[in-house]
Image: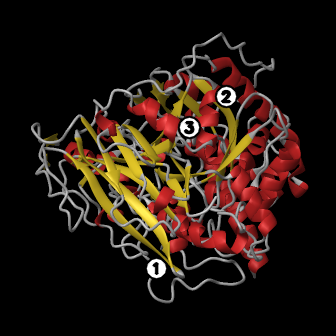
C-alpha cells in the first residue's frame, strides 16, 4: 500500500510539474552560467592600521540562487548580485518585480549558500546533466513548491540516521551532486574575490552546513574562511554530522587556510545544538568539545528566526527576554530528552536552546572538562534567502523568501503557503534579521576575521548601534569620560571577548561601556550589563542598568532605571522626538562581585521602541495588527562577553 501511495504521489507531482511548466514558462529559471575564469583576490594595498580599531558592520549568513531552497522559492540573485546589493546597488526581490536597496552600504559580507544544494542547483540548471529532467529538477526550475518538502526533508538527521542526497536530483548516493559541487564552489570563491576591495569592502568565502531535524529543526553552521585558501569542495549534511564537519575542517583546512564555524540560531535546534549529546545522540567527548572550542568561538544571538539570547520562563526572569521569541518555553514533559535523538519536543525551547543559559552552563562545564567548551562571542545575521545582504530595515521589509513572503498579506498570515507549513511556523513570527559588528584595525579580510576570532564582535537586531565594552582592574571611576579611554582600556584591560583573571586583592573589576545610536533608527534608551556566575553547584544571573537616557539614574536596590516615557504612535509609526540619547557611557563596578566565583559579563544596548515591520504592513493594508505578535519592538545590540576566572 505504501508503495502504491508513493507511485501515486510521484504521478501527481509529475502532473503538477507538467501543468506548471506549461503555465509558468515565464518563470522558468535561466540555465546556470558559471565563471569560466577562477578569480584570485586582489593584491592588498598598503593600508594604515588603527591601533584603537574601527567599527565595521556586515553580513555573515546569506543565501542566493545557488541555495536549493532559495532557488525553488524564486530567488534570482547570485553571489555577485548579493555583493553588489551589499555595496548599495538596487536589486529585484526574487521573481516579484519589487525593488529593494539597502539603507546604507555594508563594510563586509559573506555569501553562505547551503552546501547540500549547490551541486543539486548545478544539476538542475545545466542542460545535459544526468538529472536535468528529473522530477525534482523540473520542479525546481519551474518553481513548483511541492518539491520543496521533498528536498528539505532529504537533509533531515535523526539520531544515528544521517541525511541523504535527494536521489532524483543527485543520483545514486548523491554522486551527481557531489561531482557538480566543486565547480559551483569555485564560482562562489571567484565572486567573493572579484568584489573584495581591501580598505573599503571585504568579502568572505563561506558556506552553510545545513542538517535539519524532524519538525523543521536546524543544526546549521556558517563556515567562514579567513582568506582565499579554502578546501576544494564543501561539506554538507549528507557528508556527516556536526562533529564530522569540524574533523573535516581540521583535516582539510590547515594554514594558510583558517575557518570559523558559527552555529545557526540555537532557538530552532530542539535542545541539540548545545545539548547533552553529540548531533548523532552519542555522548559528548572531550575530543569533540575541544574542536568546538577551537572552531566555534561565536554564535548567532539574533537572526530572522528570532532571538536566541534568552526566553521568559527558561532559566530567566529578565523582563527583556520576551524579545522576538519564535517559540514558547517547553511545557512540563515537552522538555524531556529522547535518548535516541538527543532532542526535546519540537516548537518549544529549554535552557539548552538559549545563549545566556548556555554561557552559564559553560562556566559549570569548565570544572568537568578542564576548559570552557561554550565560550561564545556574539554575531547577528539575516539568514536572508533573497540574496539581499543586510536588508534589516523594519519599514521597508519585503520578506526573506522571494514571492513566498513578499506581500503584506503573506507576512501577516492572511494568506499562507507551503513553506510556512513545512517549517511549522507563522511567517509573522519572523523578522528582518540582524547584523554583525566587529572592531578591527582595517577593513580587510584578515583584520575583520581576526576580530571575529578574538570575539571582539557584537550582534544587533538590525540596527547599526556602535558599542564598546572593556573590563579591567584599578580603573578610575570616570574612565568613560577621559579622552584616552580607549588607549587605557586596551593597555590595562581587555575588550569584549577577552578574559580577566584572579582579581588583585579580591577587588572587583570595572567595566567601561559606551554606545552611540544608529542615526537611521531610534535614540538609545539604556545600557545594561548582564552577568552570569557560578554559585556552589548552580549558576545564576542578574541584569544591571548602568546608563540611562534623559538623566534617569538606576535605583540602587533594583539596579533598574524608570521608563523614559518614549512612545510610538501606531497610527503613523512616529516616535517620541524628545526622549532618548544619541550616546551613553559609564564606568561600572560590580557591586556583587566575589573573587572566588567564575563569571561572565556582556553589554546589552536598548533603543527606544519603534514600529515592528508587521505594524507597517498592517497600516499598508488598513487592517488590524495580528493578535499574538507585538506591534512595536525595541531594537538592540549585544556585545560579546568578558569572562572572569578566579585562577589563570
Residue 608 vs residue 515: left or right?
A: left
Residue 113 pos. (x, y %)? 66, 41
What is the C-alpha distance between the residues marked 2 and 3?
31 Å
Tell whether label 2 touches label 1 (CB within 8 Å): no
Compared to residue 127, the image places residue 373 above or below, namely below
Residue under the image location 76 percent in, 27 percent down: 228
Residue 446 is labelled as: 2
Q: Which residue carries the number 3 mark?
A: 75
Quarter of the figure that contains the N terminus: bottom right
Left or right: residue 129 compared with residue 469: right
Q: Residue visible at 72% across and 12% down?
A: 43
Q: Residue furthest bottom?
A: 333
Position above or below: 426 against 349: above
Can see residue 308?
no
Q: Going from the N terminus, do you reach mark 1 or mark 2 first?
A: 1
Q: Which mark is residue 330?
A: 1
Mark 2 residue element: helix
Dot 1: what SS? loop
Which residue lies at the image location 88% right of the left edge and 48% below the top edge?
A: 251
- Measure the C-alpha gap from mark 1 to mark 3: 35 Å
For this view, does 96 lie left or right of residue 523? Answer: right
Q: Position of residue 646 (x, y in %)?
A: 56, 64
Q: Number of numbered discs present?
A: 3
Amino acid at each position: 500500500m505504501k508503495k502504491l501511495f508513493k507511485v501515486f504521489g510521484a504521478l501527481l507531482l509529475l502532473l503538477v510539474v507538467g501543468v506548471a511548466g506549461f503555465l509558468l514558462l515565464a518563470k522558468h529559471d535561466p540555465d546556470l552560467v558559471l565563471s569560466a575564469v577562477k578569480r584570485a583576490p586582489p593584491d592588498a594595498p598598503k593600508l594604515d592600521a588603527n591601533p584603537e580599531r574601527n567599527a565595521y558592520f556586515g553580513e555573515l549568513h546569506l543565501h542566493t540562487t545557488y541555495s536549493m531552497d532559495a532557488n525553488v522559492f524564486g530567488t534570482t540573485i547570485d553571489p555577485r548580485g548579493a555583493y553588489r546589493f551589499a555595496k548599495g546597488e538596487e536589486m529585484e526581490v526574487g521573481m516579484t518585480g519589487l525593488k529593494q536597496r539597502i539603507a546604507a552600504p555594508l563594510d563586509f559580507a559573506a555569501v553562505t549558500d547551503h552546501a547540500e544544494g549547490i551541486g543539486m542547483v548545478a544539476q538542475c540548471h545545466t542542460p545535459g546533466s544526468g538529472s536535468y529532467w528529473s522530477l525534482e529538477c523540473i520542479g525546481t526550475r519551474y518553481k513548483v513548491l511541492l518539491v520543496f518538502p521533498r528536498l528539505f526533508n532529504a537533509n533531515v538527521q535523526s539520531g544515528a540516521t544521517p541525511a541523504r542526497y535527494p536521489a532524483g536530483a543527485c543520483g545514486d548516493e548523491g554522486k551527481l551532486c557531489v561531482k557538480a559541487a566543486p565547480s559551483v564552489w569555485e564560482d562562489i570563491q571567484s565572486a567573493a574575490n572579484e568584489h573584495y576591495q581591501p580598505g573599503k569592502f571585504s568579502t568572505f568565502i563561506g558556506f552553510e552546513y545545513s542538517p535539519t531535524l524532524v519538525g523543521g529543526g536546524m543544526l546549521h553552521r556558517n563556515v567562514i574562511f579567513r582568506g582565499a585558501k579554502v578546501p576544494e569542495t564543501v561539506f554538507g549534511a549528507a557528508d556527516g554530522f556536526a562533529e564530522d564537519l569540524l574533523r573535516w575542517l581540521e583535516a582539510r583546512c590547515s594554514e594558510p587556510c583558517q575557518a570559523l564555524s558559527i552555529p545557526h540560531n540555537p532557538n530552532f535546534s530542539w535542545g541539540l545544538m548545545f545539548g547533552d549529546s553529540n548531533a548523532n545522540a552519542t555522548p559528548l567527548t572531550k575530543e569533540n568539545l575541544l574542536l568546538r572550542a577551537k572552531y566555534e568561538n561565536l554564535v548567532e544571538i539574533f537572526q530572522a528566526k528570532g532571538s536566541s539570547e534568552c526566553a521568559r520562563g527558561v532559566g530567566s526572569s529578565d523582563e527583556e527576554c520576551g524579545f522576538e521569541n519564535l517559540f514558547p518555553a517547553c511545557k512540563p514533559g515537552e522538555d524531556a530528552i529522547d535518548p535516541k535523538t538527543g532532542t526535546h519536543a519540537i516548537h518549544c525551547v529549554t535552557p539548552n536552546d538559549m545563549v545566556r543559559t548556555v554561557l552559564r552552563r559553560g562556566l559549570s562545564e569548565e570544572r568537568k572538562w578542564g576548559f570552557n567548551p561554550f565560550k561564545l562571542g556574539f554575531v547577528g545575521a539575516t539568514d536572508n534567502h533573497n540574496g539581499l545582504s543586510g536588508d534589516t530595515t523594519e519599514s521597508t521589509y519585503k520578506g526573506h523568501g522571494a514571492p513566498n513572503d513578499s506581500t503584506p498579506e503573506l507576512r501577516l498570515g492572511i494568506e499562507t503557503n507551503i513553506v510556512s507549513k513545512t517549517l511549522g511556523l507563522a511567517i509573522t513570527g519572523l523578522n528582518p534579521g540582524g547584523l554583525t559588528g566587529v572592531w578591527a584595525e582595517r577593513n580587510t579580510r584578515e583584520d575583520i576575521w581576526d576580530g571575529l576570532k578574538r570575539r571582539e564582535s557584537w550582534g544587533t537586531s538590525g540596527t547599526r548601534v556602535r558599542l564598546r565594552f572593556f573590563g579591567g582592574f584599578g580603573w578610575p571611576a570616570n574612565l568613560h569620560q577621559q579622552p584616552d579611554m580607549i588607549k587605557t582600556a586596551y593597555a590595562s584591560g581587555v575588550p569584549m571577548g577577552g578574559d580577566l583573571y584572579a582579581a588583585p586583592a579580591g577587588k572587583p573589576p570595572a567595566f567601561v561601556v559606551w554606545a552611540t545610536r544608529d542615526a537611521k533608527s531610534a535614540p538609545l534608551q539604556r545600557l545594561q550589563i548582564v552577568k552570569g556566575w557560578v554559585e556552589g553547584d548552580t549558576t545564576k544571573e542578574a541584569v544591571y542598568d548602568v546608563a540611562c537616557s534623559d538623566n534617569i539614574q538606576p535605583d540602587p536596590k533594583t539596579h533598574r532605571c524608570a521608563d523614559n516615557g518614549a512612545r510610538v504612535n501606531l497610527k503613523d509609526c512616529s516616535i517620541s522626538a524628545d526622549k532618548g540619547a544619541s550616546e551613553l557611557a559609564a564606568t561600572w563596578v560590580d557591586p556583587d562581585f566575589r573573587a572566588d566565583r567564575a563569571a561572565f559579563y556582556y553589554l546589552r544596548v536598548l533603543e527606544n521602541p519603534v514600529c515592528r515591520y508587521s505594524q507597517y504592513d498592517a497600516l499598508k493594508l488598513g487592517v488590524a495588527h495580528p493578535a499574538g505578535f507585538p506591534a512595536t519592538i525595541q531594537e538592540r545590540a549585544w556585545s560579546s562577553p568578558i569572562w572572569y576566572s578566579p585562577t589563570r
